Image: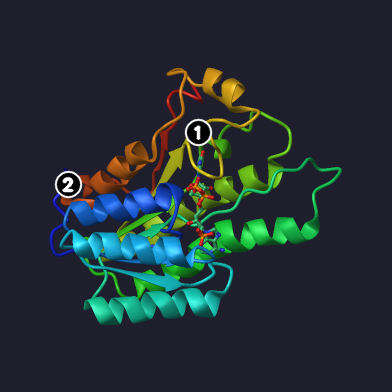
Amino acid sequence: MADLSGKKAFVTGGARGIGAAIVRRLARDGAELAFTYVGSRDTAEALAAEIVSNGGKAQAIQADSADAAALSGAIAKAADRMGGLDILVANAGVFTPGTIDEFKLDDFDRTLAVNVRGVFVAAQEAARHLGSGGRIITIGSTNAGRAPFPGMAPYAMSKAAVAGLVRGLARDLGPRGITVNNVQPGPVDTDMNPDSGDFAAMVRASTALNRYADVSEIAAFVAWLSSAEASYLTGASLTIDGGFQA
Ligand code: NDP
């Protein structure tokens, strides 16, 4: 367990999947949470209520990561309401499959708007509120380093862009004592990548551990990175993929 007592955290895309596990874990470790959703209002409200009923503090906010004004406004308001900000987890992401002969430019633009521009906007607004010891953690993907199947070029590109962004942001924010790191999961059982789909057996077999991750395994890593113990780690892309790239 990481000691995050008194910390204020903002998570994008926190209603479902990896983001929801991060919200739950940071709350369990003592942080106060604000998190965004785009469509899953009921799920998001239920998660915030669950945390409050367990004695924690959490607020769900609707903000599309592709809408810069909505996203930065949500972060500014949450920081104001919580009395500051210590941790940003830029988790929201989309994956639209498709090979180059069929991929629509609208989907290309949406992938970049959410997976890259949204991460930049969130980091830029968070940086206005973070102090020394602050943490920015992005959720990239092992697909930045290995795209094992056809049909994932724009997604892989977007996650490789996040790895580059994090290196640069670490340089921008290092002098202020803020660390910036990129967590690159392998296959994690969520709506985006269910451990039951057509490709699941092939995906499983391409990891050294021969299984998908549970969302809690990614959240545990994010909690540690959020903690004081990770104070000298910055600018890194940290792959947690069951050996998918091994
Ligand atoms: P899911 O599709 O299961 O959940 C995505 C979450 O992001 C949802 O809460 C969704 O909100 C939110 N979201 C999507 N688009 C937006 C948006 N425009 N604005 C705000 N929130 C948004 O995905 P995962 O949990 O699997 O993925 C989370 C992150 O992890 C993504 O960045 C993904 O690329 C990355 N990742 C996932 C892997 C996997 O195998 N699952 C592997 C490697 C990386 P709502 O519920 O409201 O729709």
Q: Residues within 10 Å of mark 2 (few under 14, many from 20)?
A: some
Q: Is residue 15 left or right of residue 146?
A: left
The amino acid type, in three-letter code, at marker 1 is Pro
Q: Position of residue 59 (x, y in %)?
A: 32, 70
What residue is pinned by disc 1? 187
Q: Is residue 56 left or right of residue 135?
A: left
Q: Which of marks 2 and 1 precedes in the sequence? A: 2
Position of 46 relative to 186 (above/below): below
The amino acid type, in three-letter code, at marker 2 is Ala
Q: Is residue 128 left or right of residue 55?
A: right
Q: How is the image coloured?
A: rainbow
Q: Position of residue 187 (x, y in %)?
A: 50, 33
Position of 12 relative to 245 (above/below): below
Outermost residue to the right: 101
Labels 1 and 2 touching (C-beta < 8 A)? no
Q: Is residue 55 left or right of residue 122?
A: left
Q: Position of residue 132 (x, y in %)?
A: 21, 65
What residue is pinned by disc 2? 2
Q: Position of residue 199 (x, y in %)?
A: 64, 27
Q: Does dot 2 land on a helix, a strand or a loop?
A: loop
